[in-house]
Amino acid sequence: MKPYTIKDRANTLLRSTAFSHGSASVIAILSGLLFGFIILLISNPSQAFDGFIIIMKGGFSTGAKGIGQVLYFATPLILTGLSVGFAFKTGLFNIGAAGQFVMGSFTAIFIGVRWTFLPAPWHWIVALIGAAAVGGLWALIPGLLKAFFNVHEVISTIMMNYIGMYLANLLVKLTVYDSLKNLSMNTAETATLPKGGLDNIFYNIRGGSGTIDLSTVNSGIYIAIGIAILMYIVLNKTTFGYELKACGFNQNASRYAGINEKRSVVLSMVIAGALAGLGGGLLYLSGANGRHLKVIDVLAMEGFNGIPVALLGLSNPIGIIFSAIFISYITQGGNYLQSMDFVTEVIDIIIACIIYFSAFALIIRGIIAKILKSRKSEEGDL
Amino acid sequence: MDILFLVAQQTMYFSIPLLIVALGGVFTERGGVTNIALEGMMIMGAFTSILFINKMGGVMSGQLLLLVAILIAVLTGILFSLFHAYASINMKADQIISGTALNMFAPAFAIYVARMIQANGVQQITFANTFRITKVPVLGDIPVIGGMFFRNAYITTYLGLLILIASVIVIYKTRFGLRLRACGEHPHAADSVGINVYKMRYIGVMISGALAGLGGLVFVVPTSTQFNATVSGYGFLALAVMIFGQWKPKRVLFAAFFFGLMKTIASAYSVIPILSTMGIPSDVFKMVPFIATLIVLAFTSKASQAPRAAGQPYDKGSR
């Protein structure tokens, strides 16, 4: 028996599933970025290289504040990514994160503006709980339709997206509308998420006046990371999570094993919806400087971007934290592209390409496995 | 009577693109590939053809311009659908993920290109509508029916109905149709008798791309004078129409008219006296088609007659 060398250890790592899955994600990202570069090159060859550098620099382009903004916009993406990823793990495809997200957003804003009788910490806590509850409710309908009426969740959640978008527009206009700006009103001070010390890190000092230019990032990012860890524990360390995953693998076998599969489908959808709804609450409870809900007939991008976040993070809650930060990072980079003759939509094109190539994961993994296998046979006795 | 005519004409404007795109969905699913990228394919088809109309509006006009635009929309749809076909057939990818990617790609691409090539970075592409046929000769003079179907019409309406007839014949009366259906029901059996499953599936997806691209143009032309990189969820409604129509062309026709009527109510409620006096906000009417879809799906999905192998990649080696 040979001693266990570093080389052996490296080989074990190379052959682990996590490695081949992870490298499939990296290949998808690189292919997407390459495609984006080609698009820049075709549309404006002279500035293409500089433009691409700006995308790659992402949030770093504007110093500490920029990094803060990356984290601020990563917060809802972590939650929608968890929503899609959790549904994936339990065998469901939740395209409805956009609708759940916007309904959660409206609820949080409504409570944040109207329920001013609540004292400081409780106000935003109640608003977040409300956002999660309404997001869950919004996913309950597709869950019930799937479990009891055999309606495919892809089609029903898409319909719920549009219904949610129009309903949120209507409700904002009826209750918390700032008609001058065509936005939702500012939430009360008591409903704003605390900064949690992040205001001491993520700010820029304006040249000249010397005033502080503060990032909108707040303790929402802590909550998002906490929820991701919680979901990791639920999925991997509890019987409940195991049952939900088992239903995703094989409904008939799960029923045979005594799991109530209809209940599992409905619960999975509700949890996924609650996560997306909470994401809406975390994004919009950020005070007067933060985001406001726009009254436009466009589906929430945060919801759809949950799909690449979940795919790149391999539906693993911890992986999702990093992939959300990555997507937020290049999206911020895209915003700075406007300083040149480019259009920010190139980022959406890149993200779409990343999703497309990550759909090839199965084949890419197969190729990686084959390469490693041939190496193994060359080495013989391993 | 005028309102009846208006509602009938509007219903045609909304139903025909649904019919065309849903028929595209029937072809791809009958061949065994789920295509939720119909929405994206509609956007791409509408984008290139409307851009063409925008650029060539000064040179050509009327039906000739529309016919060339139709050709461009169809070709764009086919080209774009090849990406979905390659991912789902050759790469055995998850077809929902591939479709989602294409759905995100299409509007981003349309906005990007429009803003890069148009002056002042405008993303809307405007066009002059010179395609409306005020009155079809002879047929337009028939009482009632003439007013409903042969005035203020577009050739695309009749094209849509022709496609329906062609689809029925191709799917049920030709060797190709039988082979396509076999690939969607039991690809291994089809393979065992010498049918090239990959080729059949490619053709199914390409037909869906062609029809979805066309549907995008057919949707935008009568209902707007500009294209803003969206078809308002029409591709998804077409999927619902296909399911409601149980993957059968003739039933798809009725489903398309049902949804077309819903959409007409949503967009024309202000001119329908009973609805406009109720004081209901426009957002509620916009929700109607989607709520109706959910309710209809709940009642029709129990006994689903979906092609059995739809959505599953075909792997020769698996049993």
Image (cartoon, grey):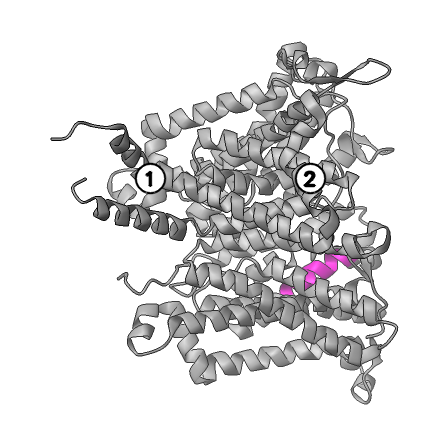
Q: Is residue B313 above or below residue A189?
A: below
Residue B104 in sight: no
Q: Nearer the viewer, residue B308 or B298?
A: B308
Compared with residue A302, is residue B312 higher up or lower down, i.e. above or below? below
Q: Residue furthest left?
A: A1
Q: Main secondary structure of the magenta part?
A: helix
The residue carrying pointer 2 sits among few (fewer than 14), some (14 to 19) or many (20 or more) residues within 10 Å by Cα, namely many
The boundaries of the magenta stretch are: B258-267
Q: Quadrant of the N terminus of chain A?
A: top left
Q: Position of residue A12 (x, y in %)?
A: 27, 35
Residue occupying the point 64% across, 72% down: B74
Vertical placement of residue A12 versus B273, above or below: above
> Same subunit under labels 1 and 2?
yes
Task: Check disc 2 and report the residue beneath it.
Answer: A334
Disc assigned to residue A17 = 1
In screen coordinates, is B244 left or right of B111? Answer: left
- Numbered tag placed on residue B244 in the rendering: none
Residue B318, given in percent of the width and then of the height, sits at 28, 61
> Mark 1 belongs to which subunit?
A
Residue B246 x %, y %: 49, 66
Picture residue at 83% right of the left edge, 55% below the top: B270
What residue lies at 33% left-to-right and 44% top-to-bottom? A249
Q: Earlier in the sequence, mark 1 or mark 2?
A: 1
| CA distance separating discs 1 and 2 | 33 Å
Q: How many marks?
A: 2
